[in-house]
Amino acid sequence: MAHKVTISGLDTNKLPKLTAKQSEEYLERIKKGDRVAREAFLLANMRLVLSMVHRFSNVALDPDDLFQVGCLGLVKALNHFDPSFKVMFSTYAVPMILGEIRRYVREANGIKVSRSMRDTAYRAMQARESLEVKNTGDPTLYEIAEEMDVPVKEVVCALDAIATPISLYEPISGEGADTLLVMDGVVGERNPEEGWTERLDLRAAIKELPDQERSVIGLRYYKGRTQMEVSKELGISQAQVSRLENNAIKRLRSVLS
C-alpha cells in the first residue's frame, strides 16, 4: 500500500494542493454555500485521508475501502468545522478521519460482501451525511434512496450487508441480574401457537405500566428505536429513557414471573 498511486480511482500524485491562505478563502466560500469550492476543498484534502490510510498498512483490509471510509470522516469534519475554532482544518479533521477508519477496522468481520454492494453502502452513508447537513435531521431510507436514485431495497440490502453481526449475549439494557440480552428477544423454533397466552399476559402487563414507561417500551421493543431516538421523540434525556426502560422491565418481570 505504501507504493499505491491510484486508490479508489484517484491518482494521488495529481491531487491538488492548497496554501494556508487558499484554504481560508475556500472555507469562506464554503460557508456561503459554494458547492464548487466545497468539492475542490475536499479533493485537495484527500491527501490527509491517504496519510491516515498509510497508518493501517499492517491491517488485512482493502486500502480502497479504508480510503473511502476515511473520506467519510473528511466530509464529517468539513460539515462540522467552524473557522472560529482558531485551529487549522487539518488539525480538526485528522482525529475524525482516524476515528472513522478505526471504527471500520474494529467492526470489520469475516463475512464476504461484493464490491458493488460495499460501494452502494458507502454511497448511502455519504448520501445520509449530505441529507443530514441539508435537513438537520436523520433522513429516512426512502430519502437516502431518492438522493442516490436507486431502489430503496438496494440501500437496505447494502447497509445490512456491511452491518456488524451482534452477539446473542450482547446486553440491550439493565444491569446485573436484570440485564436484558439480545437472545431474550429472539423467537425460538417452537410451535407459533405456543406462548400465545404469554403474549397476552405481556400485553396486559404493558398496559398497566405508567404512561412514560409504556411509551418507552413501545418505541424501544416494538418500533426498534435506539435510546437516543426515544430521547428525542419524547423530549427527555437519554439517562431518563434508560431509567424508565429498566424500571419497566423490572415491573414486567415481577408481574410475569
Image: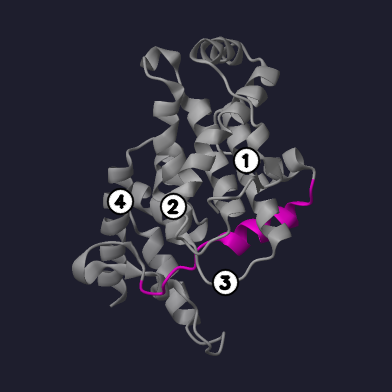
Distance of label 4 from label 2 (alpha carbons): 25 Å
| Segment tinted magenta in the rendering | 150-169
The residue wearing badge 4 is: 242
Q: How is the structure coloured here?
A: one colour
Tags 3 and 1 in contact by the CB under 8 Å rule? no
Q: Amino acid at mark 2?
A: Arg
Q: Secondary structure at mark 2?
A: helix
Q: Tag 2 or tag 4, which sits nearer the N-term?
A: 2
Q: Report the residue at 41% width, 66% height from top.
A: 204
Relative to 93, say whether 35 is above or below. above
Q: Is residue 204 visible?
A: yes
Against 3, residue 51 (above or below) is above
- The answer to whether residue 219 is visible is no
**In this picture, residue 216 sits left or right of residue 151:** left
For mark 1, what is the residue? Answer: 126
What secondary structure is marked by label 1?
Answer: helix
Residue 154 among those drawn in magenta: yes
User: Of residues 14 and 114, which is closer to you in this image?
Assistant: 14
Residues tagged 1 and 2 counted as in contact (Cβ below 8 A): no
Residue 133 pos. (x, y %): 57, 28
Q: Which residue is mark 3?
A: 111
Quarter of the image that includes the C terminus: bottom left
Question: Measuring 62% from the left and 63% from the top, which residue is drawn there?
Answer: 161
Q: Quadrant of the N terminus?
A: bottom right
Q: Residues within 10 Å of mark 3 (few under 14, many from 20)?
A: few
| Whole-number angstrom distance, CA of label 2 to CA of label 3 | 17 Å
